[in-house]
Amino acid sequence: MDDRTGPLDAAHDQARRFLEGLGTRPVWPTASYEEMLDALGGPLPEHGQDATNVVESLARSAGPGLAGIAGGRFFGFVIGGALPAALGADWLTSTWDQNGAMTSLTPAAAAAERTAGRWIVEALGLPTGTAAGLVTGGLMANFTGLAAARHRVLGEVGWDVAQRGLAGSPPIRLVVGEHRHDTVDLAARYLGLGRDAFVLVGADDQGRMRPDALRTALRSGAGPTIVCLQAGEVHTGAFDPFDALIPLARDAGAWVHVDGAFGLWAAATPRLAWLTAGIEDADSWATDAHKTLNVPYDCGVALVRDPADLVAAFAIDADYIPGSGEDPMNLVPEFSRRARGFPVWAALRSLGRSGLARLVETLAARAASFAEQLARLPGVEIVNEVDYTQVMLRLKDDALTVEAGRQILAEGTAVLTPAQWEGRAVLRCSVSSWATTEDDVAQTVAAVERVLADLV
Ligand SMILES: *Cc1c(COP(=O)(O)O)cnc(C)c1O
């Protein structure tokens, strides 16, 4: 039990092999969930096994069931890779085993998190003093921002939700776009805001909220109001027109929250900042470090303009903990947790402001290149305006699109994932990893071309 270096050496060796193999292994897993249950299943063994053997056998068994997310040709969903510095720091985070909650017990973790949060605020051009809490992902970042919002908008009508709870409170209107991410609905549910609280606002053909529709929606009622906007629609990558929308919400006295899970990072480069113009006037923002910033899973970032709103929603007072106003746990829903600040700090430190700008610009440039090359293939139609990192394509009819999607996954060169847009089948291609090169784009386009040649 006390051999600590054997398992670490084995992990290092396995990690190297995995990374070295990414260029040639199929990007989609070759084993199914059922096969993985067989490989990793069975009853709980009666007796233990040597730790080094455990690590080696885990790597051996899991191998065929792993997706090539860390490589350069994974374009499914919106996922992101892991920058080398962030990956190294993530290993240390596990090794150090710090509890990220407190400044007193774990000052290095708390300081890394505080600094990383400040750097993110600075890089994205958000108001100085904006508080940042590191959570598990975009869903929880939305939850955290909306929890601060709930506290504030109820407080403004004299209802202290921390004291009185929600039962009997004035109703909250949650004004959302038709094309909001599904996690906004789930975050609202956690907060006791059911679908009856939602006011849906219409969108344009790229999924951007329409200002005239927001104006009408805001006038349709009154009382405590939260407006939830979006930076980066998950299919099209489109951004709500913040410049036009936020002043309308402000006039109505609403709290403005922005879900920018992958899109908020456009603000990090002057070349793309037109997409996020006006976004700094919101009250809270949610983003992911494990998507565009390329930090390993899991890491989301909740940003709230006035730290007092976040603290009001989440601070706790435990009599056995020497509390400090700066404790990271006062800014997030969790108590004990992983010291997520280390990999985020390392990612930002390795990139610097210019490297971060270049990372985001490059993702968008690769997406543009994809759109251009795919559009040249016979029968391929690019469905969205490619301003950011998302490309959607479709073929002559849905059956063909679906079949092409299936064959592309099976072919193994790259991963594009199927979806529906405006009632029709599409294939989504999301460029979100630092590891994607122009050659990866070319290889992927060639694979799509091969599949289509047999199909069309
Ligand atoms: C991915 C995503 C989320 C959810 O983030 P998780 O990290 O998966 O919890 C929310 N909103 C948008 C726009 C996203 O792309």
Image: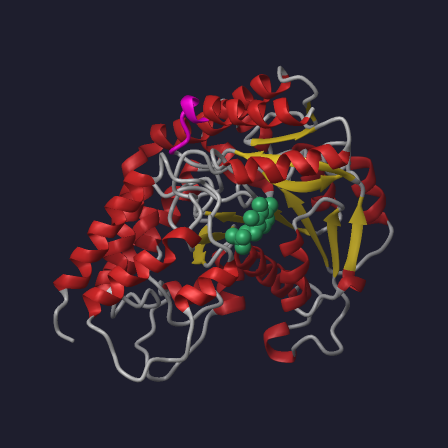
Q: Nearer the viewer, residue 187 or 421?
A: 421
- Left or right side of 121 for 179: right
Residue 201: x percent and y percent?
Answer: 79, 45
Task: Work out whether residue 263 can be spotted.
Answer: no
- Left or right side of 225 for 451: left
Task: Work out whether residue 11 can be spotted.
Answer: yes
Residue 419: x percent and y percent?
Answer: 67, 42
Q: Nearer the viewer, residue 81 or 108?
A: 81
Quadrant in which the C terminus is drawn: top right
Q: Which residues are magenta?
A: 435-440
Query: In the rendered image, which quarter is residue 104 located in?
Result: bottom left
Query: In the rendered image, which quarter is residue 234 located in?
Result: top right
Residue 4: x percent and y percent?
Answer: 14, 66
For the point 59% across and 36% down, the residue is 407
In reply to whether residue 77 is colored magenta, the answer given is no
Vertical arrangement, residue 183 with respect to residue 71, above or below: below
Residue 273: x percent and y percent?
Answer: 53, 28
In reply to whether residue 438 is colored magenta, the answer given is yes
Query: In the rendered image, which quarter is residue 434 located in?
Result: top left
Quadrant in which the N terminus is drawn: bottom left
Q: Residue furthest front?
A: 454
Vertical arrangement, residue 227 with respect to residue 454, above or below: below
For the point 35% across and 67% down, the residue is 101
For the point 54% across and 31% down, the residue is 389
- Left or right side of 284 for 21: left
For the point 71% across and 66% down, the residue is 193
Vertical arrangement, residue 16 with respect to residue 152, above or below: above
